[in-house]
Structures are given as C-alpha cells and as structure tokens.
Image (cartoon, rainbow, N blue to C red):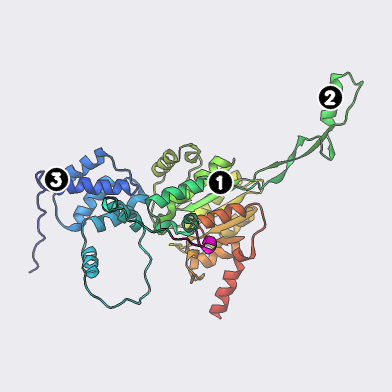
Amino acid sequence: MPSPRAEPKEATAEGRIADNIVYFARTLRKAGMRVGPASVKDAIEAVLAAGIGSRDDFYWTLHAVLVSRHEDHPVFDEAFRLFWKSRELIEKLLAMFSPVAPDDREKQKPRAAENRISQAMFEGHHKNQPVREVPEIEVDARFTFSGNEVLRGRDFAQMDAAEMAEAKKAIAALRLPFDLVHTRRFKPDAQGRRIDPRAMMRSAARTGGALILPKFRSAREVHPPLVVLADISGSMSQYTRIFLHFLHALTEKRRRVHAFVFGTRLTNLTRQMRHRDPDEALAECSTAVKDWSGGTRIGDALAEFNRLWSRRVLGQGAVVLLITDGLERDDVTGLSEEMERLHKSCRRLIWLNPLLRFDGFEARARGVKAMLPHVDEFRAVHNLDALADLCASLDRRPAAAVDPRHWLQAGGRRAA
C-alpha cells in the first residue's frame, strides 16, 4: 500500500524561516523585483498559515505573494533555486572542491536571470573582499573591445541587474532617423515650386488688389505611422519587458506610434505607453494585459488586428514592426492569409525574431514558413546592436542581409 502524503509541518514564528524569507526578499529586490516590506510581511504570514510541506508547496506559497508581474517569474524561479539550496547547487559546490578531469564539453549558456540573481546574492561577499593591488600594465587598446561594446552585444536574457539598467538607458538614448513621407497636403514654402493661389488672393485682399505678390507652397512631409505588434507569450517572456521599454522610447520620440501586444488575444497598449514615466507605463501595461506569458495564437491576433485596427492605424505609408518568434500553437492555415493582408496594408513590414541569435537557426517551424514569404525584412532583436541597426535602417532601403528570401531559399535547398 502506498504511504499517505505527509502532512505539512507547522511553521512557527520563533524559527529561522522568517529571517530567511526576509533575506530572500532582499535578494529579489536587488535583482530588480518590486518587493516591499508589506509583501515580505504577507509572505511570512502566508508561510505560517500554510505550513511547510513539499518544496513545490513552499515555492508556490512564496510565488503567490511576492510575484506581482508576469515578467518576474524567471527571476523568482532562479532566485528560489539558488537561495533555498537545491540539490543542483549542492552538487555544484561539491564539484568545486573535488579533483575532476578537465571538462572539454561545450559550455551551456547561462539561464535567464541567472547573472542577476548570483550578483544579488553574493554582493556582500564581493564587498567584504580586500582590495587587490593590480600592477599597472600598458596595453595597446587598438584591437580591444570596450565595456560598452560588450554590453551592446550581450543577449538581453543573460544580462544581470546592472547591465539591464544600462541597457534601458541605452534604449532611451536611441536616435530615430528622419524617415519622412510626402503627403497630399501642402504647407507655405518660400522656396517651393508650386504657386499657392489662395495665399496670393488673401495677400492681395489686404491691399485692395493693388499689389499681388506670388506665394509658393510645397508638399508637407510627416513621419509615417509606426505600428508595433509584440508577442508576449511564454516563449518570449525573457525579452518582453525590454521590448516594452523599447516601445516606450519610440512613443516618446515620435508621434503616431501604435503599440499592440498579443499572446492568445490582442491588446492595444497605445494609451498606456503615453505616460512619461516608463515604470508607470509598464505597470499599467501589466494591468491591462490578461494573457501574459501564456500561449501563442499569432493567426487569431493578426486576424483581429486586420479586422478592427488595420484601417485606423495603417495609413500614410505606415511601417509595421512584428516582434515574435513565429512559434504558432494553433493551425497555420489562416496565418499566411492574414500575413499577406497585413503586408499589403502597410508600406513596410519588418519581422523581428529573437531566435536569429542562434547561428544554426533554420526556417523549419510551420509558423515561420507561413509568415516569412510576406515580410520585407527579417531581423534579429536580442541585443542593443540589433535595436540600433533597426532604428538606423528605418530611413533607408533594406540591406541584402535581412532579405527573407535568403532563408526561404536555404530552406528549399535543404528540403531538396
């Protein structure tokens, strides 16, 4: 007979569990999460009420109280794994003091938010270490990289808290190009080549028609609308918050920027992005979005956008930025038709895919194959260099390196 499940042990206020929860909350705060004294008090009371059962029960008790934003889930998960001394961490500590043969295997990339958590946990240890006197060495820096260059090439998912703060400052300082389009309206222009008869008649009426001076006009130039469709599903959760900072920077620097996010449904965040404070804007976005870090229904989201918002925002040569990995959960039958309609409704459709950070990426997924023929550019969007290249390319013709036909032809050759 299988033994019944053990009852959770009662947590008492006299034990060390309360102190450990306080230290754990400090680690989360240093890693960038919003954890205040009230949340810490609620977490201690929740543990005292629920007791300490299995590791999963304890995890979800703290998660329900301390995690208030969907994008903080990877940070909390990594902090819980390291702080509460999982078996994996103990094995790593034992391996550090054991003589082992040299490991020639390829090193795996660190997990999401691992750098931020390790930096927050061992911050005091690094401060207490004595300062080492480093001898001065003259180095020829002509062929070296600065810290700024290293940061610009680092993946967003592998940044620590300090690097993430610097990345947000760099995104706010991005310079957008003057990509202007001609409209059918005119403006007064002394150097214009068109005669402005109405302005001439108004000027002559002031003098009783005794003096008629020529007036000229030229076509008015405006920034085209910029429409952003960002994926906030679970596979894109590592990049969601930095993408929203990028959208907020775009909204501050130019007019007619429309922001939409989608997971299993489409949400318009244009009004929330108009706040000058980025933290307040992102807090309202978290409240407005109901399907954060869920599934992905790209076809249904694009169909809703084409039906309800396409004619409202895709005018005067609009540019559309589609930020998604293309991993569609549902059937891709209607995805190709919706992408074709979106492509025909705008002047330029740019697909930003963070999966292009991998050197061996191939267009094999069904969603990627259905979407790729209907985009003008196919770009990576995983670091600061990729965002800077995107901003610099808005007022010029697309380069051959971002032509989606290269990926389609490569996939066709491999299939043959």
Viewer-closest of 176 and 312: 176
The answer to if 143 sits in the magenta stretch is yes
Query: Residue 408, image x and y in percent?
Result: 58, 70
Q: Is residue 212 above or below residue 227?
A: above
Left or right, 261 with reference to 214: left
In the orientation shown, which residue stands out farthest toward the bottom? 416
Residue depicted at 56% across the width and 81% down the height: 416
Q: Residues within 10 Å of mark 2 (few under 14, many from 20)?
A: some
Viewer-closest of 312 and 107: 107
Which region of the structure is painted magenta? Answer: 137-145
Residue depicted at 36% across the width and 49% down the height: 70
Q: Is mark 1 on a helix, strand or loop?
A: loop
Q: Earlier in the sequence, mark 3 or mark 1?
A: 3
Residue kind at label 1, given as amino acid type: Trp
Q: What element carries label 3?
A: helix
Q: Residues within 10 Å of mark 1 (few under 14, many from 20)?
A: few
Instruction: Look at mark 1 in the image and give the residue it sits on.
Output: 309
Q: Earlier in the sequence, mark 2 or mark 3?
A: 3
Instruction: Look at mark 3 in the image and give the residue it sits on.
Output: 48
Q: Residues within 10 Å of mark 3 (few under 14, many from 20)?
A: some
Query: Residue 395, image x and y in percent?
Result: 66, 52
Q: Is residue 22 above or below residue 380?
A: above
What whole-number distance in Å separates the C-alpha atoms at marks 2 and 3? 83 Å
The answer to if 282 sits in the magenta stretch is no
Q: Earlier in the sequence, mark 2 or mark 1?
A: 2
Residue kind at label 3, given as amino acid type: Leu
Whether tag 2 and tag 1 are in contact, CB under 8 A, the answer is no
Instruction: Look at mark 2 in the image and give the residue it sits on.
Output: 203
Left or right, 3 with reference to 270: left
The reply to whether residue 291 is in sight is no
The reply to whether residue 88 is in sight is yes
